[in-house]
Amino acid sequence: MTALVRPRNGRVIGGVCAALARRFGTSATTMRVIFVVSCLLPGPQFLLYLALWVFLPGEETTKTAW
């Protein structure tokens, strides 16, 4: 498993689903579908998404010395 960070590439809104997909080895589309379907169930899914968006660190890029 990789570290749970929001990637710079492949994000649609906040990169949370892309980060979770990368962490668990699935496609980002699959994770997005799972999230949308889970929003049909009662619970704090949307609030959890917002919390992950705020608290997950973004992926750092490597800086080149030019």
Image (spheres, helix red, strand yellow):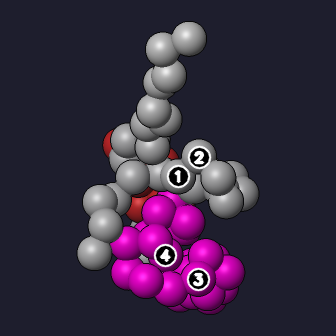
**Residue 38 shown in magenta:** yes
- The residue tagged 2 is 8
Which residue is found at the position 37% from the left and 72% from the top? 23
Which residue is found at the position 51% from the left and 59% from the top? 16
Evaluate if marks 3 and 4 touch, with contact meaning CB atoms under 8 Å apart.
yes
Q: Which mark is residue 27?
A: 3
45 left or right of 4 in image: right
Q: Position of residue 12 (x, y in %)?
A: 71, 57
Q: Earlier in the sequence, mark 4 or mark 1?
A: 1
**Nearer to us in this view, 19 or 49:** 19
| Residue bounds of the magenta highlight | 16-42
What is the secondary structure assignment of the residue under circle 2? loop
**Callout 1 amino acid:** Pro
Classify 45 as above or below 56: below
**Callout 3 amino acid:** Ser
Real-space Cα separation, disc 2 to disc 3, in angstroms: 16 Å
Q: Which mark is residue 21?
A: 4
Evaluate if marks 4 and 1 touch, with contact meaning CB atoms under 8 Å apart.
no
**Callout 4 amino acid:** Ala
Real-space Cα separation, disc 4 to disc 2, in angstroms: 14 Å
**Callout 2 amino acid:** Arg
Real-space Cα separation, disc 3 to disc 1, in angstroms: 13 Å
Evaluate if marks 2 and 1 touch, with contact meaning CB atoms under 8 Å apart.
yes
Real-space Cα separation, disc 3 to disc 4, in angstroms: 6 Å
Real-space Cα separation, disc 4 to disc 1, in angstroms: 11 Å
- The residue tagged 1 is 7
Q: Earlier in the sequence, mark 4 or mark 2?
A: 2
**Label 3 crowd bin: few (<14), some (14–19), many (20+), radius 10 Å:** few
